[in-house]
Structure formats: structure tokens, C-alpha cells
Amino acid sequence: MESVAKINEVPNFGKKVVSVAGREVLLVNVKGNIFAVENECPHQGSPLNAAIVKEGFISCPRHGYRFSLVDGRCAEHTELELKTFPVQLSGDDILVDCS
């Protein structure tokens, strides 16, 4: 796991783009739970850093496709899945595994 940011850099319901192992990863804070997902919608590649986060889902700003922050699944379009990455907190550090 790689340290990618400090917890205070991702405010509640906020997002932060980081680079992990050559990938652009989006960190999302939902009430202290940190999620890490690829920063590109699997539908048409729209960046998700402008996405809306609500009720455990992230919605693509282009077409509104909603993906679970937990497992990346899209209920409306089951053929699409957003890549998610394991996250661990170590003190103030956010660790992400992109292997």
C-alpha cells in the first residue's frame, strides 16, 4: 500500500485526485470513510472529480451513471463497473493499493 494523502486533505463529502502507481485515483470522503476509485467513468471516460457523491454512490457528471463506492457496480448498467481500490488509514495517512 502506498501513502497518497493526509486525511485532512479530503474534507467530508469531498474528493481529491492523486497519482498511485501511474494511475489517476479519486479519493472520496463519506463521513470519515475514505474510498478510492479510478478517476474515469467506464462509460465514456469522463473525469469523476466533478461527480456528485450521494448515499454511497458517485454519479458521473456527463450522463449520471451511478457507481457504488464500495464495489464499483452500476445498478442501472450492469455491464459497467468502476474500478475500486483497497484503502487503509494509518494515523493521518491514507494508504491505497493499486496492485
Image: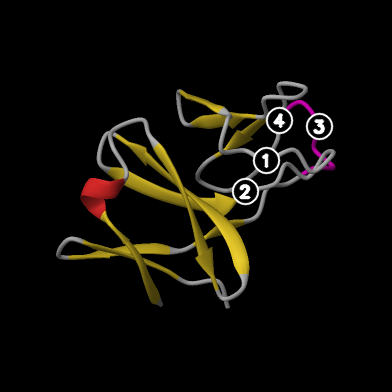
Q: Is residue 48 left or right of residue 88?
A: right
Could you tell me which residue is drawn at 45 percent across and 23 percent down?
55
- For discs 2 and 3, the disc positioned in front in the rendered view: 2
The span shown in magenta is: 75-80
Label 2 amino acid? Asn
Q: CA distance from mark 4 to mark 3?
A: 6 Å
- Viewer-proximal residue, 74 or 90? 90
Q: Is residue 78 above or below residue 83?
A: above
Label 4, secondary structure: give it: loop
C-beta proximity under 8 Å, tags 4 and 2: no
Q: What is the CA distance from the residue labelled 3 to the residue labelled 1?
A: 18 Å
Q: Is residue 82 magenta?
A: no
Name above or below for residue 34 compared with residue 49.
below
Does the magenta stretch mainly form a helix, a strand or a loop?
Answer: loop
Q: Earlier in the sequence, mark 4 or mark 2?
A: 2
Q: CA distance from mark 4 to mark 1?
A: 20 Å
Residue indicated by mark 2: 39
User: What numbered label is drawn on residue 92?
Assistant: none
- Callout 1 environment at 10 Å: few (<14), some (14 to 19), or many (20+)? some
- SS at mark 2? loop
Q: Which amino acid type corresponds to the residue marked 3 in the rendered image? A: His
Q: Do labels 4 and 3 touch, CB within 8 Å?
A: no
Task: Tell me the number on the disc at residue 77.
Answer: 3
Is label 2 in contact with label 1 (beta carbons under 8 Å)?
yes
Image coords of residue 16 (percent x, y):
43, 46
Point out residue 87 in the picture as x, y percentages from the top left corner.
39, 61
